[in-house]
Structure formats: C-alpha cells, structure tokens
Amino acid sequence: MKNLRKIFVCIVWALPFWSSAQHSADELYKELDHLVAKPTIENLQRLESYCDNFNLTVKSSNQQLALVIARANLGYYFGRYGDLSKSIDNYEDAYHRFKSNQLSDYNIYENVAVPLAAIYIRQGDYLKAEELLIQCASHAKDTANNSLLYNTVLSLSALYNSTSRYERSYLLINETLKKKGIPPGIAAALKNNLATSYFRAGDFEKAKQLLFEIQVLAGIDLVNTYKSLAFMALKEAKAEEAMEYFEMAKSTLSNKKRIRKGLGKLIGGRVRITIGIGLYP
C-alpha cells in the first residue's frame, strides 16, 4: 500500500512538469501566430529570442516540431527583410533538426529545403544548393510528389545552366518532360529552361523550336518567351525580328498589368504574378 502511495505521489508530482512542457509548445505557436499576424522587425526579433530560450529546454518530438516550424518561419521572414545570413541560419536549423529527430507531419522540403537552396544560389554557394536540391528531387520521386519534383527540377536546371553544365540540364528536363499530365504552365517553364540550355550551348535552332512550342500552349504567360526570342534574334543580327518580339512582349506585359490592376480592385488586395526564367541576361 505504501509503495502504491509513493507511485501515486510521483505521478501527481510529475504532472505539472508534463503540462508545462506541452504548454511551452503551445506558447511557441502563439508567438509564431503573433509574428504571422503582424510581421514587423520587432515581432521577428521577439520570436527569435523566444526560440533561442525555448531551445534550451526542448525535449519532446512535439516541441522539436514546433521549433522547426518556428525556425522555418523565421527563415522566411528574415529573407523578406533582406537578412540572408539569419534566414540561412534559421532554415538550416529547421532542416537539420527535422532530419536528426526523424520528425514528420511537416513539408520540410517545400517549406525549408527549396527556399534555402534558392538563397544558396543567390549567394553563389552552388555546391550546397545542388546537394540540397538533389535531396529534394530524391524525396519527390520516392513520394510521387510532382509539385516538389517540378519546382526542384526548375531550380536544378537553372543552377546547371548558370554553371555551364548544359548536358545535365538537358538530361534532367527531358526526363521530367516524359511525365504525363504536366500542367501547361510547368511545361512552359521546363521548356524555357531547356531552351536556355540549348541557346547557351550554341544550338539556336533547338532553342527556337522549344520557344515556338511554348507559344502554342494555352493560357501561358508569354512575356519571357517573346523576350527570349527577341534576344536570340539580336544574337543572330536580325534587328527587325527582334523589335517585333520586343513589341509583343511589351504588349503582353501591358495586358498583364491591366488584368492585375483589375483583379486587385476586384478582390481588394494584391495579385501575385510569377515570371519565369528567360534566355536574356
């Protein structure tokens, strides 16, 4: 009876500590919600300080995951404010913490690995970017995550083009284009990167053929396609043809701005329009 009483006392004594641990994760999420609702520098620094202190006592998987998500958001917002050093530090912490603790229930590749690789590329750290993107591509293939695969292939092929490894870009994109059901916008972006590879390798005819193929795709933003064709025409000393494509690009861009302005008034907010990668510098 005495032993049972001791066990009961121990359980009751331990309950406040267990509750406190759970509460700490909830408090971290509250701090994160505060930042997302009002992403100021002050709130960003406040969350960073909270994460640093939280890290001193983190133990459970739930706590680790909360810290991963908070660090990922810190990486995103520091990047928005232009502090790439802190953005990298937080993204790297989130990625390695998620991996080392074998966590789940969070899209670490799209939320952390892809944007981190993009910052590495901006800073010219192509080796780290390539290593990370290859991990993303492998995970995408293993899990049949086509969205992640397309994003990764676009980033990797752009990286290979920037470092003059055109053959790797050819192989990667051509293999990806074999997949069925690729959305037209993604197909256009992939073909545009492939056209860039051929163009920079000196094969203008293959590059032009791909750009012509993009033109016939329905509902595609053709601004960069026209700019690429104009740039290619200039390289071939075809000034009049280049001017025609520049005018087409200008007209398309003007139409886009009018549509964006109209949609902005309609929904009372900003409309984000993504522009792809072109051949031009």
Image (cartoon, rainbow, N blue to C red):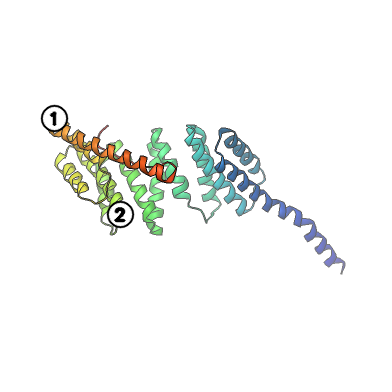
Q: Which residue is painted at 48% across and 52% down in the image? A: 107
Specify whether 171 is left or right of 243: right
Which quadrant of the rendered structure holds the C terminus? top left
Is the residue marked by circle 2 packed among few (<14), some (14-19), or many (20+) residues within 10 Å? Answer: few
| Image coords of residue 203 (percent x, y) | 16, 40
Percent x, y for residue 109?
45, 49
Q: Identity of the amino acid at label 2?
A: Pro
Q: Amino acid at mark 1?
A: Ala
Q: Is residue 98 left or right of residue 228?
A: right
Q: Relative to residue 22, is residue 269 depicted above or below? A: above
- Report the disc number at residue 239: 1
- Residue 273 showing in the rendered view: no
In this view, the residue in front, 270 or 109, is 270
Q: What SS does tag 1 mark?
A: helix
The N terminus, quarter of image = bottom right
Q: Residue furthest right?
A: 2
Disc 1 crowd rating (10 Å Cα; few below 14, some 14-19, many 20+) is: few
Q: Do callouts 1 and 2 mark residues in contact (Cβ within 8 Å)?
A: no
Residue 197 point in image, percent of width and height = 24, 41
Asked whether 254 or 235 is in front, the reply is 254
Report how far apart the C-alphas of labels 1 and 2 lie in the structure.
Answer: 34 Å
